[in-house]
């Protein structure tokens, strides 16, 4: 049984079995109840290239920083703020191995028409690539949360892009980005990503969408994007579940 079928079954089960809302504990409920989604999960206006939250009244589709200098991504989408209660749910997903959350996370992203439209216009020649983990971190965690999210996104939408977890590699174990100041983050990631050497030709002239669960400074996505562009990718965008607030 492949990943997509398993994800599909998991999605069906999560939709059928009554459960407790993970935020307010109301019961029975969807994984997060309607009231909590309305209170904490409303879509916000975001910069189209870095997904930073924008004031609702701002006319421009980009933030001031992206207007000043290109960000390095052609487009970037985020569904939720990396704040209460989502930061805690992401930790449970990632650190307590509650991989079933990938289904909820994908459906939350796909509830945003812009994300759904963006993913469904991709073709089988385009790539949907999870941000990779180092071998060490993958062995420690047991799964790549971004890969689970990519599979769930693919499975729950009409996205025809090809998902692959072995084309973009993380070849160097680095300190967790969360431990570092903004200025040290790009330095920490130097040489961390590479394209599988025998498959570089598969990126020539292609569009790539990177997938991850959390975006803070964006240093990981930007470093990966630059490696993909060097291999010949023409467009590199990102879809992330959560995005930190402007600092
Ligand atoms: Zn609730
Ligand atoms: Zn921006």
Image: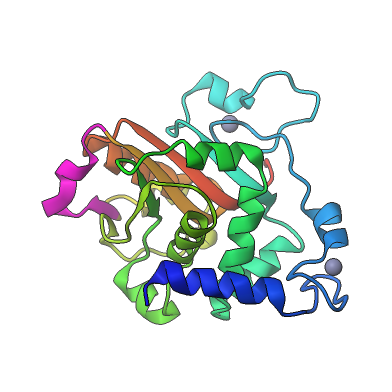
Q: Is residue 144 visible?
A: no
Residue 183 pos. (x, y %): 48, 45
The percent position of residue 127, horizontal first and vertical second, equals 34, 46
In the image, what residue occupies the spot 79% across and 30% down?
56
Q: Which residue is located at x 43 percent, y 63 percent?
A: 147
Query: Magenta segment: does it hold 202?
Result: yes
Q: Position of residue 238 (x, y in %)?
A: 48, 43
Question: In the depicted view, which residue is nearer to us: 35 or 155?
Answer: 155
Q: Magenta part of the protein: which range? A: 193-205
Query: Left or right: 58 with respect to 93?
Result: right
Residue 136 against residue 163 in the figure, above or below = below
Residue 201 in view here: yes
Q: Give whichever of 166, 60 is nearer the camera.
A: 166
Which quadrant holds the N terminus?
Answer: bottom left
In which quadrant of the rendered view does residue 247 lie? top right
Residue 31 left/right relative to 229? right
């Amino acid at each position: 049984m492949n990943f997509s079928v398993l994800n599909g079954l998991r999605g069906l089960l999560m939709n059928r079995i009554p459960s407790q809302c993970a935020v307010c504990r109301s019961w029975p409920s969807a994984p997060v109840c309607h009231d909590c989604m309305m209170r904490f999960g409303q879509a916000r206006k975001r910069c189209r290239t870095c997904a930073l939250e924008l004031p609702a009244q701002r006319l421009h589709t980009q933030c001031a920083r992206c207007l000043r200098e290109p960000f390095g991504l052609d487009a970037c989408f985020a569904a939720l703020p990396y704040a209460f209660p989502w930061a805690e749910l992401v930790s449970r997903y990632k650190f307590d191995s509650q991989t079933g959350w990938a289904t909820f996370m994908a459906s939350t992203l796909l509830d945003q028409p812009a994300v759904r439209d963006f993913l469904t216009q991709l073709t089988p020649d385009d790539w949907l690539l999870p941000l990779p983990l180092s071998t060490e971190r993958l062995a420690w965690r047991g799964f790549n949360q971004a890969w689970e999210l990519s599979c769930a996104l693919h499975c729950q939408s009409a996205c025809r892009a090809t998902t692959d977890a072995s084309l973009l590699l993380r070849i160097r174990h680095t300190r967790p980005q969360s431990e570092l100041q903004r200025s040290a983050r790009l330095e920490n990631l130097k040489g961390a990503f590479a394209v599988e050497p025998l498959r570089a030709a598969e990126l020539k002239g292609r569009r790539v969408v990177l997938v991850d669960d959390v975006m803070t400074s964006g240093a990981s996505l930007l470093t990966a994007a630059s490696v993909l562009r060097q291999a010949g990718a023409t467009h590199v965008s990102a879809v992330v579940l959560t995005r930190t607030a402007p600092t």
